[in-house]
Image: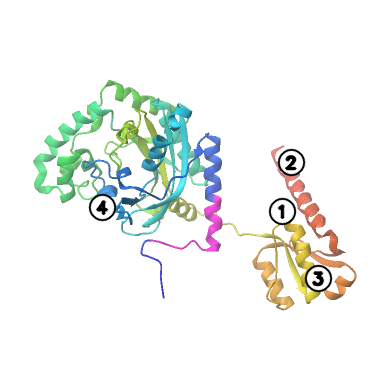
Amino acid sequence: MITKPKGTYDVLPDEVKAWTKLESIIRRICQIYNYKEIRTPIFESSRVFHRDASDTSDMVTKETYDFLDRSNRQITLRPEGTAGVVRAFIENKLYAQSPMQKLFYLGQMFRYERPQKGRNRQFNQFGVEALGSADPLIDAEVIALGTSLIKGLGLKNVKVKINSIGDKESREAYKKACVAYFSQYKDELCGDCLTRLEKNPLRILDCKVDRHKEFFLKAPKIKDYLNESSLSHFETVLKALDEMKIVYEIEDNLVRGLDYYSHTVFELEVDIPEFGAQNVIGAGGRYDTLVSDMEGPDIPGVGMAFGMERLLLAAEFANKSLGKPDYLHVYFIALGEAAKKACLTQMNICRLGGLYCDMDYLSRGLKAQFKTADQNHAMFTCILGDNELEEFKINIKNNETEEQETISIYDVYPYVLNKINAKSACAGCKEKEVKE
């Protein structure tokens, strides 16, 4: 039997509803914040992701899917969304169309990492990128969008962990301090951190192996090396979060896993006991030199990304499942060949009018067809036999009230539509009474 590759999974029909609901919520929130959707290729030139030999992030050095195509071009399956969006921003000169571009994306990413619950080698990511402004308030807006999404899923106790890694001048001063400090402990550093010490010492702070060692806890803090402009930027972001009543916690060792960040970096956490210590479901930061590093103009940006599997898992653990059952407006039960053809005709009329409908195509008995109507959560069931057809009548059952009527076969669509509209109007009246 042929099976799926390790680290991938199938989204089965019963699960798709939750995915489409999540995507709908994401698109709604992005519309509220005026972010426009962009779609980029699943694979790119390897140069998009492997830009700099000093980039020591695990994603770039260990986890990318790289290959040669048939023309011997170096190709990489995208491991994250930001670099591809920035490439498209530059190549299509979006900066010439508008000085500020607020974009979002939904798509599949690929990383060769150890599969675990909510983390796969092929996964889906939602992200936003705001390109064109160095204003710290746009940093705060991106964070606000992220917290709005989490709350929109019905999750509570959202926490923002935030830090500043400053501008280039601040980072250079801090790098020197880190090299001087960690050089004393070369014998205790893991192999990855020894490499980072030479290429990018800031990445040592993101180490999952050494972070709990005593010498690590006493390492220099970047906040002590921020210059005046970097401090001002960070303080403005924090004040904006205060104004929006967004709860945050300053995390001194937060640097994020990618090497293109500057100034604001942040992670979004939810209080989900089942996640244990791995309760981060979204993260991002500012990247003021990424566009120019990719041979574009000197344009700053800030962004954020969520693993969509993690969002769905968080909603499930919090009993906020997005996968509500699908339903039909009408399920047609035909008893006889002539009745089946007549049902097909009426079903087509209903479908053209926007009603969700289906019927049996397996020539099964009445009991089996009723069972299928229940499985499909049909609001109405229409039963037509050859005898009713001779009188141009059809039996229709309201599956919520259990009431059954006999109507003209030509009245199925207006009958169901009127019942649905009446129910919606009644629900609206009750809601109004509650508010009053």
Per the model, the C-alpha gap separating discs 4 and 3 is 63 Å
Residue 404: give x, y in percent of width and height.
82, 65
In the image, which is nearer the foreground, mark 2 or mark 3?
3
Residue 11: give x, y in percent of width and height.
49, 61
Per the model, the C-alpha gap separating discs 2 and 4 is 60 Å
As drawn, 366 above or below 331: below
The magenta region covers 8-21
Q: Camera-side residue: 326 or 402?
A: 326
In the picture of the structure, the residue carrying the numbered disc 1 is 354
Per the model, the C-alpha gap separating discs 1 and 3 is 22 Å
Per the model, the C-alpha gap separating discs 2 and 3 is 40 Å
Say if mark 4 contacts mark 1, CB within 8 Å.
no
Per the model, the C-alpha gap separating discs 1 and 2 is 30 Å
Which residue is located at x 33 percent, y 51 percent?
76
In the picture of the structure, the residue carrying the numbered disc 3 is 384
Mark carried by residue 433: 2
The quadrant of the image that shows the C terminus is top right
Mark 2: secondary structure: helix
Q: Earlier in the sequence, mark 1 or mark 2?
A: 1
Which residue is located at x 35 percent, y 32 percent?
296
Per the model, the C-alpha gap separating discs 4 and 1 is 50 Å
Q: Earlier in the sequence, mark 2 or mark 4?
A: 4
Say if mark 1 contacts mark 2, CB within 8 Å.
no
Q: Is residue 18 magenta?
A: yes
Residue 400: give x, y in percent of width and height.
74, 61
Which residue is located at x 71 percent, y 53 percent?
354
> Badge 1: few (under 14), some or many (20 or more) residues near its Cα, within 10 Å?
few
